Image (cartoon, grey):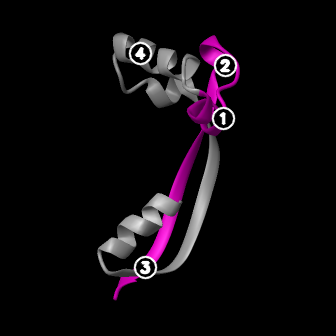
Amino acid sequence: MRGGNDALAKQGVVIAYVEELDKVMEFAPWAARHDASMQAFLRAMLAHADPAARASLDPQGSGDKLTFHLREGVFIARKG
């Protein structure tokens, strides 16, 4: 979450707490909000991600069983 910390600090925000959440996402329901061509594009991005992105997203399975990891940050902060 280093990038988030830096961005907040540049805005004069004092960070009191940071938590990183890592959850496994099922691709099909996550991508269902998009049309078929965008879903194919997103699936291809996962399949051909560079090594750093692949390590972070950790795509597993295929077809309707495709999953990936999503990392989110929670920040508790106050204006300094």
- Of residues 24 and 56, the one drawn nearer to the viewer in this rendering: 56
Instruction: Tell me the magenta residue range.
Output: 51-80
List the residue tagged with mark 2. 65
Residue type, mark 2 in image: Lys
Residue at point 65%, 14% (across, down): 62
Judging from the image, what secondary structure is the residue with disc 4 in? helix
Give yes or no for contact between labels 4 and 1 (Cβ–Cβ under 8 Å).
Answer: no
* Mark before the other along the chain sequence, 2 or 1: 1
The residue wearing badge 4 is 41
**Reading the chain from its start, which is encountered first: label 3 or label 4?**
4
Q: Secondary structure at mark 2?
A: helix
Q: Looking at the picture, tell me which residue is in the foreground, 11 or 59.
A: 11
Is 22 positioned to the left or the right of 45 in the image? Answer: right
Residue 67 in magenta stretch? yes
User: Hey, what amino acid is under mark 1?
Assistant: Ala
Give the farthest residue toward the bottom. 80
Q: Amino acid at mark 4?
A: Phe
Q: Earlier in the sequence, mark 1 or mark 3?
A: 1
Residue position for label 1: 55
Q: Earlier in the sequence, mark 2 or mark 3?
A: 2
Q: Which marked residue is nearer to the observer: mark 2 or mark 4?
A: 4
